[in-house]
Image: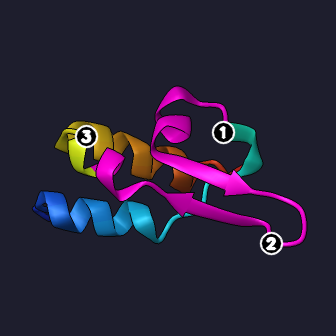
Amino acid sequence: MKVELDREALIALVCVQVPNYSIFEHPLVKKCGSYCGGFVEKWSWKGYELEELSKQELYELYMLCKNSFEK
């Protein structure tokens, strides 16, 4: 199946992902999001950073997060 996604759809795909702890320090992940540890334990994406990424970078970020939980 082939699906064409525009920038907004790619950003939406990224925003529903939460990266595994193991990739928090990856340059692309670190640039576009932040983690609040402790009691809250929450990952937040930086919308303004996501808006600056190319479609290819958004796809790479999505795949990084998606695959970060695979063993």
Tell me if residue 58 is in the magenta stretch.
no
Residue 50 visible somewhere in the drawing: yes
Q: Is residue 18 above or below residue 28?
A: below
Q: Is residue 45 left or right of residue 54?
A: right
State which mark lies toward you, 2 or 3. Answer: 2
Q: How is the image coloured?
A: rainbow
Neighbours of disc 3 within 10 Å: few (<14), some (14-19), many (20+): some
Q: Which mark is residue 53?
A: 3
Neighbours of disc 2 within 10 Å: few (<14), some (14-19), many (20+): few
Residue type for callout 3: Leu
The residue under label 2 is 40
| Disc 2 from disc 3: Cα separation | 28 Å
Question: What residue span does the magenta drawing correspond to?
Answer: 25-50
Q: Where is residue 14 shown, x and y percent of the image? A: 40, 60
Q: For numbered disc 1, what is the local secondary structure?
A: helix
Residue 1 visible somewhere in the drawing: no
Q: Residue at x 46, y 71 (%)?
A: 16
Earlier in the chain: of badge 1 and badge 2, it is 1
The residue under label 1 is 23
Residue type for callout 1: Ile
Label 3 with label 1: CB-CB less than 8 Å: no
Q: Which mark is residue 69?
A: none
Question: 53 or 61, which lies in front?
Answer: 53
Label 2 with label 3: CB-CB less than 8 Å: no
Q: Residue at x 64, y 48 (%)?
A: 68
